[in-house]
Amino acid sequence: MSALVAFCFLVILALLLFSISFGLKFYEGQRRKKLVSMLRTVTQNGESEHVNLLVEETKKRDVVEGLFSSLNITDRITMQLSESGLDWTLNRLAITSCITFMIGAVASLRIPLESPPALRALAVGLCAAYLPLLYVSKKRSARIAELETQLPDALDFLARSMRAGHAFSISLEMVGEELHDPLGQEFRALFNEQNLGASLERSFATFARRVPIADVRFFSSAVLLQRQTGGNLSEILNRLSHIIRERFRLKGQVKSASAHGRLTATILTLLPIATLGGLLITSPGYLDPMMTNPTGRKIVALGVMAQIIGNFFIRKIIKIKV
């Protein structure tokens, strides 16, 4: 009996020590990750680099240089991953796209269409491989929308803190601690970069690049101009937050006015796809002549092109920038 008690005691002690060791390693890993993130914000750009927060300089480029610069896909995807807030790398995104491509290619063999299996597998696989990038794009859009929603409250908090007598850097730290993520995380990164010795212009330039919102550029420009020329920064921030809220109100009115158009675009886009799927399920051989006859293939191709063009123009009509 005593041997069993001693054995159970040793097992519990070993589990306790393992849990403590795992907890300490996890805490050390989180602390190291936070420190690396703080240092990366400082060292990712050179001190001599100058960034204009309001007007981007346009350089004259020839056609070939402009084409290759526009095809810089790696940097664009990396920027999208950073702006989406996901802890993904390019390797993880590529592996996920390859997995979804294989799943789509295998699943395409179950589609009852008289078409070459290789062509069908390639088309469905490419559509499936695009799904991870679409997910990243949706997360980025949702995060940017949340950043825009949080920004007026952050500016009001910053203005109240400065009117209370706090220094600007202390106010930035308080905003980063009080606000929820994702904007709180960005303000904490801004404060950490300044705290580690970066200049104010460089810190706000990096902040404007991490948060791709026009209002953030206005905020950064207001702070830098106030440091150079003087003025009541808290009053400027209050007016800026008021303008942002008024634009949100106008966006809501525009969104409600264009709701009918957006619903029409969604229905007109999904109705042919739903009809095609229903015919494939209820009558698998009904659409075979459309895929085997050359005239039928041309009609299908023209229908798809007309659907894409119509959806494009509807989106252009209902998309109103405020």
Image (cartoon, helix red, strand yellow):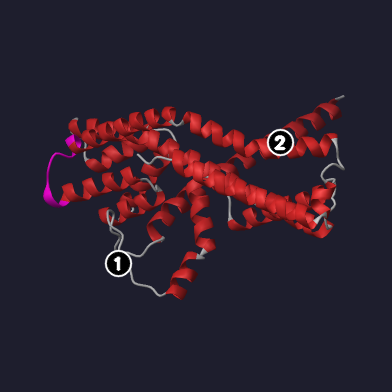
**Residue 45 visible, this orientation:** yes
Write down the residue under mark 2.
Answer: 274
**Closest to the observer: 299 or 237?**
299
**Closest to the observer: 64 or 151?**
64
Check the image and name the residue furthest to the top: 1
| Residue at x 44%, y 73% (from the top left corner) | 63
Q: Specify the amino acid type for callout 1.
A: Ser
Task: Provide the secondary structure element on which disc 1 rests.
Answer: loop
Residue 59: image quadrant is bottom left
Magenta residue span: 228-235
Quadrant (top left, top right, bottom left, bottom right) of the C terminus: top left
| Residue at x 22%, y 46% (from the top left corner) | 222
Q: Is residue 177 above or below residue 316?
A: above
Residue 248: image quadrant is top left
Give coordinates of residue 170: x percent, y percent.
Answer: 27, 39
Give coordinates of residue 167: x percent, y percent.
Answer: 21, 40
| Residue at x 84%, y 34% (from the top left corner) | 282
Q: Callout 1: 10 Å neighbours few (<14), some, many (20+)?
A: few
Q: Specify the amino acid type for callout 2.
A: Ala
Membership of 231 in magenta stretch: yes
Give coordinates of residue 308: x percent, y percent.
Answer: 59, 48
Quadrant (top left, top right, bottom left, bottom right) of the N terminus: top right
Query: Marks 2/1: CA distance?
Result: 56 Å
**Residue 199 visible, this orientation:** no
Membership of 258 in magenta stretch: no
Of labels 2 and 1, the one closer to you: 2
Write down the residue under mark 1.
Answer: 48
**Closest to the observer: 150 or 227?**
150
